[in-house]
Image (cartoon, grey):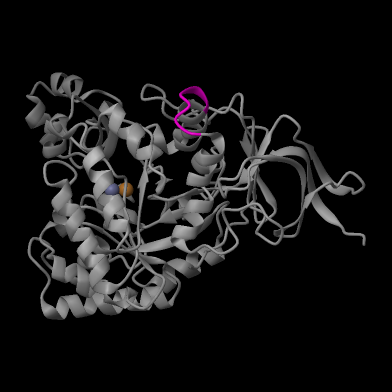
Amino acid sequence: MSETFDIIIRNAAVIDGTGAPRVRADVGTRADRIVRIGDLAAERAGREIDASALVAAPGFIDAHTHDDRMLLSDPAMAPKVSQGVTTVITGNCGISLACSPALSASIPPLDLLDSDGEWFRYPRFEAYRDALAAAPAATNAACLIGHTTLRAATMARLDRPASARETARMRALAGQALAAGAIGISSGTAYAPAAAATTQELIEVCRPLAGTRGLYVTHMRNEDERVLEAMDETFAIGRALGVAVVISHHKCVGKANHGRSGETLALIERTRAQQDLGLDCYPYTASSTVMQSGRAGQATQVLVTWSKPHPELSGKTLAEAARALGVSEAQAIERLKPAGAIYFLMDEADVRRILAYPQTMIGSDGLPHDARPHPRLWGTFPRVLGHYARDLGLFPLETAVHKMTGLTAARFGLQDRGVLREGAYADVTLFDPLTVLDAASFDDPVQPAHGIHSVFVNGEAVWVHGQATGARPGRLLHA
Ligand code: ZN
Ligand code: CU
């Protein structure tokens, strides 16, 4: 039987995303699918790649992003495709562009998506979906709806629990969004605009998830002293609705809580016996979000990532910014706002323990619109592959790939993604296992990684020779 191929990747070390050991094989694609994995020595294709020094892996799935706007405003998605990412999960931490109100004032953390508010123009999920369909991005996207966004769209004041009427309105918006293709609902009760929401409010807003494959994904109410309590609330919401939950960017914050990942992971492991539960993590000991005095107080160092009134102080430490402004650090926080920051507040041993936990997916939590972003935006995936898997030996490369492909696709219900097998979509990343490594650092955060050879989305090259190709084959994925 003779076949035709658009692309043949020859003699690659194929790591298929399931966690299985690599095998040496050729990979042939046609249109948007992988059609053969095996010996294609007798076959020819329009594009042939000698991959004898490379790993062929499923394109990486970024389990935790804030790329809602980058998909539309910077569709080449360079921070992502340069790392081998071919699919992004958007709408995390309670904030989504979809279902957003028109904003007249900056509401942190919604302003992480757009500090000017101009992009908050998709009152229905359908409007966001149609905008993406009309102007696709380089990567695929699967979208969560944010509970904080729903609150801002529904409530005049955010410092109280929602009324029954407001809750019903949010539930209706969420239900419409899920019917139109959203894959779940996220929350961020750690942040002021959702902190007053009760557990019952969250359950009622997330009610449309019940009986579907949709997920409840949460930046939990607490990640420090009361982290176990916050986990119990998360599990209770999942149980009340009978839905799978994902704990976002799991961490133990502040010196007093360093080392507690042993406890939190044990609780996750016990709870997994009773309900469906997942988590993601980024490979750094510093977090990043909006400027908050509470977080700053828990950190050993704070870096300014952006500031609306003082853009010139981006990249400075909070101490330097305070000196430049001639005020105390506490006063500087208020003078810099609206602003974002990086906070050094985790323990390396916790980060490693959480990364190595078998159910942990890799999610960057990158903030694409920050003037001086946390290096996780450009470095997360190569850092896990090169630094944690290869150089530190935290787990085999096959496990690292699984945590960013097959595990994630299964968790989010993305059919025929996250695996290299015949019939699956041709989302493929070729990388050099000897050189793959993050290049972005806290001092120099906008740097494409080393060792990513080429990246294909739905059978089209999006990153080759260290550059975005400009192709925009990305699709909106449904669970
Ligand atoms: Zn978050
Ligand atoms: Cu986040």
Q: Nearer the viewer, residue 329 or 254?
A: 254
Say which residue appears at 42% left-offset and 62% top-offset: 143
How many marks the image carries: the answer is 0
Say which residue appears at 38% left-offset and 73% top-offset: 177
Give x and y (percent) for residue 140.
Answer: 54, 56
Q: Is residue 316 above or below residue 361?
A: above
| Left or right placement of residue 167 versus residue 250 in this view | left
Give x and y (percent) for residue 361.
Answer: 42, 47
Does residue 9 show up?
yes
| Left or right placement of residue 182 versus residue 386 in this view | left
Which residues, given as a range, are shown in magenta?
Answer: 390-395
**Residue 445 on the magenta segment:** no
Q: Is residue 276 above or below residue 114?
A: below
Q: Is residue 127 above or below residue 311?
A: below
Q: Main secondary structure of the magenta part?
A: loop
Q: Quadrant of residue 364?
A: top left
Image quarter (top left, top right, bottom left or bottom right) of the N terminus: bottom right
